[in-house]
Each structure stands twice: as structure tokens, then as C-alpha cells.
Amino acid sequence: MNMPARFPKPWSQTGTQPKIAIIGAGMSGIAAVVKLRRAGYTDLTVFEKADKVGGTWRENTYPGLSCDVPSRWYSFSFNLKHDWKHRYSYGPEIQEYMEETADAFGVTDIVRFNTPVTDLTYVGPHWQLTTGDGEQMIFDVVISATGVLHRPAYPDIEGLDAFAGDMFHTARWDHSVALEGKRVGIIGTGSTSAQVVGAITDKVGEMHVFQRTPQWMAPLPQKRYSESWKRVLKTFPFLQKLGFHWYFQLMLRTFAAATVGNKPMQRLLSWLCLRNLEKNVPDPELRRKLTPDYQAACKRLIFCSDFYPAISRDNAFLVTESIERVTPAGVQTADGKVHELDVLVLATGFDPGAFILPTRVIGEDGRDLAEFWDGAPRAHRAVALPGFPNFWLLEGPTGPVGNLSLITITEHQVDYVIAMLDKMKADGLAAVAPREQAFAEYNAGMREAVKKTVWVTGGCTSWYMDKTGTPNLYPYEPARYLHDMLHPSFAEYRLMTDVQVPTPLESAA
Ligand code: NAP
């Protein structure tokens, strides 16, 4: 019979380093390693399913890939870069930056590449981690740094598999397929599609864009930085910091304010987008088809200056009839027309409910994370979960995402985790987890507040919505979230000095 057993003393009571597992070597994983080390936590192992760091910037390689958050802000605070080539960086440069940062800060060395984590089981106060090849290890703390949008969503369209040409999702771009002169179709008109269409329309034979819902699109004031400006920034590093904070505040006060209820800012955004449309799409019929009937910023606002000129070209066709089925020859729409294609690109987005799933995560008393979330992921302050002690999420559900620098958000979340670890160390705690009641109250407040945001009042649906139709986003000013990350309330947590488990664990593998 298994008798409750007391554990050997936890790390916080013996003065040893906690063994910390970080899952994912994208920008969150990199930020976690650098900041944890600086805070004195050095026993770190990163698990990465792929063979390189970079996360979303490694995975997405589609033509036109770029970041619509300004480069000066979309940077690690501990590794500002004086020589960004553009105001808005293209994917390859960001991926290079991720790899350079990981190398320069000693992250790459501690990553176990090609090692997916399949199972995490809490055997209090430790976590048992299982990798894809069945290896098991024990950790004191687990940090999920898997990102949000990493599982491509494939549309449920009749006949999709029967298409005779080349077909791929934007996140799995097949670079062996030449596009020059081809008849290319793209399903979807989100941020990704806008960048792809903007980049390839002048190279392909025909560009057919299948639009289900028109999007609000603001111009992207792209700019190439001069060599002399890069030299100035190198000479005066404080200007790099100034640039970081300038864009940080600009985005918080304009776009972010508009989404959480600032009406004048919302009107300004709509005006900016409509003006962009009028200026760049001369054909009134095309303009009509591209005009949304819901509020700006209800879906994630697109910043792109290349899409409208591209879709206005003679070889571009905006198809607004709904898709009936895919045939071997192309896409058939509701009017019976078959749009014949050589290549079909699926710009249909991602599963927004994935986060750390499909890793199986089992917490206290056998609580299964997939069941706990049940298609509507929630977390306490986007970083912690009741029933899952010593486990934190970076970029977890209900955090401020959208048109913000996720690097800044993630860095603040790492600071929060560090404050928790410091508390454990100072008080000799074996385990910490948010109280069920604190979690419930926090999320009840969010549910009320979110009703007033443009994501709900704006009259659209988007990937922000979970299975219950509730936006999975932070409904207040992001500045409030960042402040809360720097000032954690320990009263919201169960602070456990002693944890009893049914069976003692074998010593760490
Ligand atoms: P998305 O915003 O979810 O857009 C998916 C598109 O596919 C939508 O236009 C959607 O139409 C359409 N769609 C989905 N299923 C369909 C179906 N069965 N039939 C017809 N159309 C269908 O995906 P995304 O463009 O890949 O962007 C996802 C997120 O990635 C963005 O919101 C952003 O957070 C991030 N991203 C960021 C950047 C950046 O520059 N920072 C760039 C790209 C992506 P409906 O609108 O009608 O649903």
C-alpha cells in the first residue's frame, strides 16, 4: 500500500539551486534564461522540439514575413540593437537576432534540441517531465515558453485534399514550389495573408485572394535606416533606449487604448484605415468589397502598406463569394465558378487554444490541463494555474497580446516568476500555486471587463475568441498588466512549506 511520504527537503530549504525546465526556445524561452540567470537561478534546461531557437520566427518563413511592431520596441531590453535595417523588421533579420541573442547570452548551449516534451506530471513538489523519446527527468519548477500561435489551423473545406496542385499552410511554406507565372490562390485575409499577397502578387501569374471577412488595415510607415543613423545609435546607446520607450509608449497610448475602450482613439484608427483604403484602392467596387462592416481593432488590426496596391493590380482577383469546395482544378465558390489554380496557400491562422498543449500536463490530484481548460484556456494573471504548483506560463491565456511587443510582455512575466522564486527561497516554500478563489475572482473580473472591449462590442469574430465566444485577451490597459507583473500579490497564492505525496519520487534522473 502506498503510504503518504514526506519529501526530502525542497531546494528552498536546503540552499540549493532549483532545477528549472523551460519548454520552448523562442523569444520567451530566451528571455527566461537570460533573466533567470541574472537573478541568480542557474540550474536551467531548455527543451525545444525543433533544431533551432527562434520559435515563431524560425517556423514562419513565408514571403513578406515581417513584424508590424516597430523593431526598436520588438527587442530584448537586455540586448537592444543599434543596426536594425528597417523600422519594421523582416522575418529573417528577427530570426538572426534571436539566434545571435541566444548565442551571445549562453542560451543555445543549454537547449536540448529536437526534444519535444510530451508529458508533465506534478509529483509534489516536483515535476516529472517526459520527452518524446521516453526519457524522464525531475524538475523543481517548470516554465512553459511555447508561445500562443504555433499549431496551424487547416480549414474544414470539402475536397481540400483532392487539390491537384501544390498546397501548403503559410506556417509550413514550401520553398521548393516556384511561384513565378503561376496561378496562386490564398484563403484568408489576416495579417499573414496581407504580407504574403503584398510580397508575391507582382511575381505570380494570377493572384486569387479568397476573402471571407474584410479586414481593417492601417498603413505601415516602413522606413530603411541609414548607415549614419546606425552609427549614431552605436555611439550613443541611450538613444536606443529612448527609441525603445518611445515606441513602447506610442503603441500603448494609441492602439492598445483603442481596443480597451478609448473612443476618440478608436475613431482615429477607423479614419486612418479608411483613408488608407481610399488612397490606395482606386476602384470603388473593390473598395466596397474591402470595407469592413464591424469596428476597427475588433479583429487584430493589420498594419500593411503592400496589400492594397497588390490587390489593385490587374493580375489580382479578390473573391468574396463563399468557398463551396476545393476541386482538383482549384477552388469552387458558391456561384458555381471554379477558380483554377496551380498553387493553393492556406493563410487560415492558428489554433488559438494550444499554448503548451498538446503536451499532457497533469497537476495536483490528477488535474488534467486540457480538461481544465476545455477549449477556453484561462490562467491567473496569464501566468499561473490553480492546481499546478511551481508551474508558470509565459504568454499564457488572457495576457495582453495583439499589436504589442510580446517580448516586453514576456520579460515582465519572467520578472513575476522570479519574484515568486525569490519568495520561495526567502520563506523556504516547497510549492506555490494560485488560490482557486483568487483565480476565479480574477477571471470573473476579466469576463465582465471584456464585455466593454471592442473585441466584443465591435461586431466581429476572431481568433481572440475561445470556444465559449469570449475573447481570450487582457481587457484592461496593458500598462496595468505590466505594473501588476512587477508587483505580485503573494496573498493570491497558496504558499506551501510542506507537501505530502502518495509515493516518494526516485532521486532525480
Ligand atoms: P488569422 O488572423 O486568424 O486569419 C485567418 C484568415 O483565414 C481570416 O481571414 C479568416 O477569415 C480566414 N479563414 C479561416 N478559415 C477559413 C475558411 N474555412 N474559409 C475561408 N476563410 C477562412 O491568421 P493569420 O493571418 O495567420 O494571423 C494570426 C495572428 O498571427 C495575427 O493576428 C497576429 O497576432 C499574428 N501575426 C502577426 C504578424 C506581425 O506582423 N506581428 C504577422 C502575421 C501574423 P475570417 O476573418 O472570416 O475568420
Image: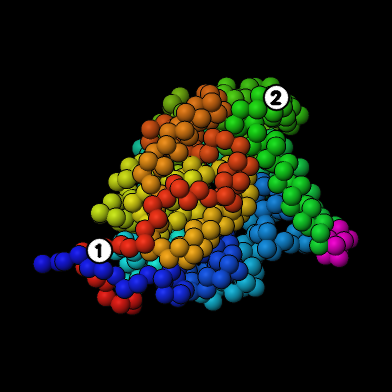
Which residue is nearer to you in this view: 172 or 179? 172
Quadrant including the C terminus: bottom left
Helix, strand or loop at mark 1: strand
Q: Of the residues shown, which amino acid type is indicated by label 1?
A: Val
**How many labels, in total?**
2
Residue 192 relative to residue 139: left or right: right
From the viewer's perspective, is the residue at label 1 or at label 2 nearer? 1
Residue 396, numbered circle: none
- Visible in this render: residue 88? no
The residue positioned 63% from the left and 49% from the top of the image is 405
Amino acid carrying label 2: it is Pro
User: Pointer 2: what residue?
Assistant: 264
275 to 494, vertically: above or below: above
Q: Mark 1 and mark 2: span between their CA atoms? A: 56 Å
Q: Establish if 465 lies above or below 52.
A: above
Q: How is the image coloured?
A: rainbow
Tell me residue 344's x, y (percent).
49, 45
The residue labelled by disc 1 is 501
Residue at image point 64% right, 37% down: 256
Q: Helix, strand or loop at disc 2?
A: helix
Q: Position of residue 191 (x, y in %)?
A: 59, 42
234 falls in the magenta region: yes
The residue nearer to you, when weighing 163 against 490, is: 490
The range drawn in magenta is: 227-236
Q: Position of residue 326 (x, y in %)?
A: 41, 38
Which one is nearer the viewer's eye here, 265 or 494? Answer: 494
Which numbered disc, 1 or 2, marks the residue that appears first in the sequence?
A: 2
